[in-house]
Image: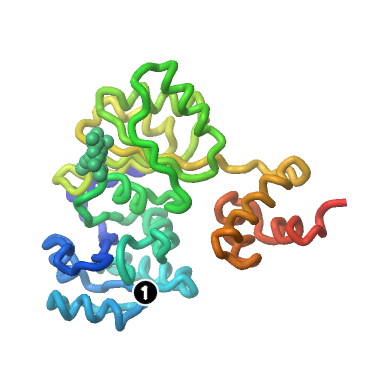
Amino acid sequence: MIRQKSFENEMPTLYLVPTPIGNLNEFSPRAVDVLKSVDVIACEDTRTSGQLLKHFDIHSRLICCQNFNEENSAKGIVELLERGQKVALISDAGYPLINDPGQKVVMMAVEHGFNVVPVSGPNAMLDALVASGLTAQPFIFIGFLPSSENERRKKLNEYKNYPMTMVFYEAPHRIHKCLASMLDVFGDRKCCLARELTKVHEEFIRGTISEILEVCDDLKGEMVVVVEGHTVEFQPDADYSLIMNMINESMANGMTKSEAIKDVASRTGIARNTIYALVHGTSRC
Ligand code: SAM
């Protein structure tokens, strides 16, 4: 488990900075300050982001991070962080990671123990999700669970087999009971508790449900719990229709067959060539 007290340590930081989806007046003063303060800004398209930076008189160095080069970009960004540089990640518009590059960058930065700090005030769920270090997409936002133990467990049982990352809101006086119910119903999944987002005592605790349960009694403030979805333990025959449904769903959402295979592989953790074989009928008698 890693506890990141965002403003109380000396580790280099990767800032996740959502940019306006339309109206430039909606960019926050803090976002501008952060982009001015970092050494490097990783963006999708240097021409598009160059215009944003020009508008706000920001002169930090721009580098490119796109889906096709994200693995290499992530390595490059981790090297910059290792050299003590401050890095911000932006996309053409909106949140990085939300249908935009950034997932690998965040995962690698978290794995290497660097701070990952979201810079956006209006919504706790998205800030927690993109900086959690868990798969940001697909996700489901659930919000508060019922306070009655029976009702809470009933709800959690409904969500138990959801393959997508789940985002919950919780109050500090109920966090212990909430995590204990999750541990019982979901098992010991990866989890991130994000609290006091964007405030002085902002903290991300990234670990498993049981690890976070051990430290949660002392936690104060507003909190979001991000929990890994159900990972499929793959049994080719039993899960054939499940996989095919996921492939068909991805294709109905506009993906090509090979994009759908890649997508389902990343959502389920099943090897891409195994799914390829299933889809093309070479692995079943
Ligand atoms: N409308 C708000 C939003 O967009 O995030 C949520 C309002 S809800 C009534 C309040 C809950 O949101 C809190 O109990 C907490 O779970 C979460 N929350 C709000 N601000 C937060 C923050 N700064 N850090 C972590 N969680 C926060």
Q: Is residue 27 above or below residue 190?
A: below
- The percent position of residue 251, horizontal first and vertical second, equals 61, 61
- The percent position of residue 271, horizontal first and vertical second, equals 66, 56
Q: Which of the image's four quarters has the N terminus?
A: top left
| Identity of the residue drawn at 33% across and 41% down | 205
Residue situated furthest front in the rendering: 252
| Identity of the residue drawn at 40% across and 33% down | 211
Residue situated furthest bottom in the rendering: 47
- The percent position of residue 71, horizontal first and vertical second, equals 48, 69
- The percent position of residue 9, horizontal first and vertical second, equals 21, 51
Q: Is residue 166 above or below residue 78?
A: above
Q: Is residue 84 visible?
A: no
What's the residue type where badge 1 is placed?
Glu
| Identity of the residue drawn at 44% across and 37% down | 208
Which residue is denoted by mark 1 in the rendering? 44
* Number of numbered discs overlaid on the protein picture: 1
Q: Is residue 264 visible?
A: yes
